Every structure is written in structure tokens, then in C-alpha cells.
Amino acid sequence: MLAHDPEPAKITGFLTRRDTQSPSDWVGVIIDSYHDKRTAYEFLVNPAGVKQDKYYFNDGNEDQGWDAIWDVVVAERADGWSAEFRIPLSQLRFPASGKPTFGFALSRQIARLNETSTWPLIAKSTNGIVSQFGELHGLELSQSPKRLELVPYTVGDLSTEPDQGNPLVKGVSPGASVGLDMKYAITPALTLTATVNPDFGQVEADPAVVNLSAFETFFPERRPFFVEGSGVFRFDMDCNDGSCTGLFYTRRIGRQPQLSADVPDDGFVSAPSNTTIIGATKATGRIGGFSIGILNALTAQEEAQVAVGSAQSSSPIEPFASYTVGRARREFANQSALGVMMTATNRNVGDERSPMRLLSNSAYAGGVDWDLRLA
């Protein structure tokens, strides 16, 4: 892709982290590989080689947490700059037919002019983005690429802390954990993603918040497993937090334990800061004219260790729980849509003597939404 510029010395490119927006020049390729005129994948690069990728759904909403495996090379030229994209077909979802038609668009941003150009023209006066794309014909795909990605990990740690008379604190405490992330393309348009004992240690920390109200604090989701494909589960209800998490708020999965141990003044307590996610799996994509999403996650029972004098005991502070959500949305040719969503939470709160009986053992919710366009 060539980006001609009569003033190449003024081309701007800032070196930042991936997916970070900056006042740079950008060129991009946008592909509606399923050709449903509602979903698309965008690949962007600036003159410094910084990559961005995002996923479009519902003809214009963006999911910037989507990350694909692709490569791009940029080069300076006497008349501007250029970018060569290499995007594996395994990163796209498309029909199984041998000669599919892709929706296609190109974009370019010039920072110093505050100008954005696209082919074809994507008019701001028209509702939607993906539905305005051009068409790419003449593709010959002999077979759909099967995609299987396995990412195992191991983590070791060693913590030291003075006990200061606390029998629950060990001076030197080694630890280790293992886990696995998996992604598999069931069909070219349907992807299964799973994780076992996930590690989110590299995820950006939440800002410090002091909540003096009786209402829950909503934090943005940054964990890769829950971010990717999150647009499928969007249900436009209670959008005050900017993410429309009224029906399905993923940050409750693996959150801080909801109960606390009863400890006397002369006692000590040690409790985990977050609930352990045993594993999670989800399937997202398209089946015929439907976009679907199914997710299930399991979290472990957590206990706090209590020490009073020489006696030690444990107290449950979070029960074993299962979280399930299902979403289906039928999309029509005139951009109308009809969808349904169901959520379920089930907890093992124990018998009547268990302190976890303070929590509800189950909760269910559902809803129907539609987008009707007459003309």
C-alpha cells in the first residue's frame, strides 16, 4: 500500500505500544470476510511500524481488544511511505465456499492535515460503516484453513515477608503455577476459545478508586480472554458505564471474594485478593444468518486462613461458582436485527450452617432486543 505525500519530511509516526492511538499518519486495510455487511476486521500501521487491529460488529461498533497474528513492513520513500501487509487467512472468518466475496476498504490518516481518506467513500452522513464497503471478487480458496493455537505457560515466584508475630506468614514462600490457552476454528466462521488456570499478570492494573456509595464500581475489562469477541455479548442495557454491562458484566468472574472471615482483635487472617478462575470456554462467530456467543466459566471456592493464638482454622469466603451466558442475534439484509440473551449464575453455598448461605445460590436473567429499520 503506497501513501504518496508531496511533503515527505512532514510524515509523522510515533513509536508506542501496539493498539495505542497516537497523532500519527496511518494506513489500514479493512476486510468484511464473511460479507455480511455488519462485521469486519481492520489492520492499521503507522510509519514507525506500530500496529493496530480491531473488530467491527453491528455495522460500526468497535472492539479494540481483538488481536490477530499478522505482520506488516513499512518503508520510507522519496514520494511518501509504504506498507506491505501479510494477513493469514486463518485470522479471518469467512464462508466455506471455494470462491467467497469479501467486503473491502482502505483507509489513510494524515496527522498534520487532520484528514482521513477511505476507499470507497465512507460517508459520515450514512448510518453504518461496514455496509458501505466495496467488494473483492476473484478469490479462490481451495479449503478453509483449520486453526489450532495452544499457548501453555508456567510461572514461578518467591516471596519474602517478615512474620512480625503472624503465624500465617512464612518468611520465604515459593510458588508456581501452570496453565494453557487454546483457540480452535470449529468452522471458518465459528471459533472455540478456552483457558485453564489463566494468568492475567500482564494485564494493566485498575486505577485506585474510593467508593463510598452502596453501588458497585464498574471497571473496564482488559483480560484478553474476556475482551476478544466481547461485541457478540453486548446487550444495550444500562450503558451508563460506557460498556453496556447491565446484563453481563465479566469483571464479576474472578472478582474479590464477597465475604470476609470473622476474626477477633487478637487474631490474624490471610485471604486471597481475587477468586481463582479454574477455567473458561467460549464459542463465538456465525452460523448461517445468526451471530452467536456462548460462554461458561468456573471459579474455585476460596477460604481465608484464621489464626487465634496457637489455633488455626479456615473460613469460606467465596463459594464454587459457574457463570454461563448465551447470546444469539439474527441479522437481516436491510440491517434490521432480532436478538436474545440469557445469563445464569450458580453457586455451591453449602448447607444451612455454612456462612456462604448469605449469598444467593443462583441467579438468572434474560432479554430480547431488536433493531427495526423500515427504509
Image: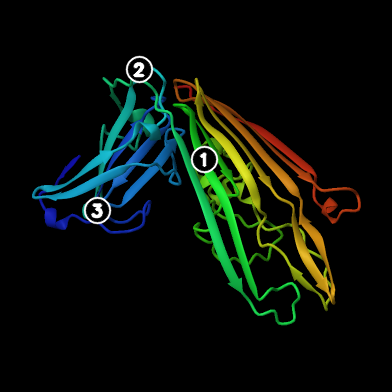
| CB-based contact (under 8 Å), mark 2 and mark 1 | no
Circle 2 is placed at which residue position?
A: 98
Q: Is residue 67 left or right of residue 121?
A: right
Q: In the image, is 62 to the left or to the right of 82?
A: right
Which numbered tag is attached to residue 132? none
Name which residue type carries label 3.
Ala
Q: Could you say which is closer to the camera, residue 285 or residue 216? A: 285
Is residue 68 left or right of 197 when viewed as pictured? left
N-terminal label among 3 and 1: 3
- The circle drawn on residue 182 is 1
Q: Quadrant of the N terminus?
A: top left
Which is more toward the observer, 74 or 160?
160
**Amino acid type for the residue under numbered disc 2:** Gly
Residue 336 image point, x, y percent: 49, 25
Q: Which SS class for mark 1?
A: strand
3 and 1 marks in contact (CB < 8 Å)? no
Residue under the image location 59 percent in, 65 percent down: 209
Q: Position of residue 241 (x, y in %)?
A: 56, 51
Residue that numbered label 3 is attached to? 111
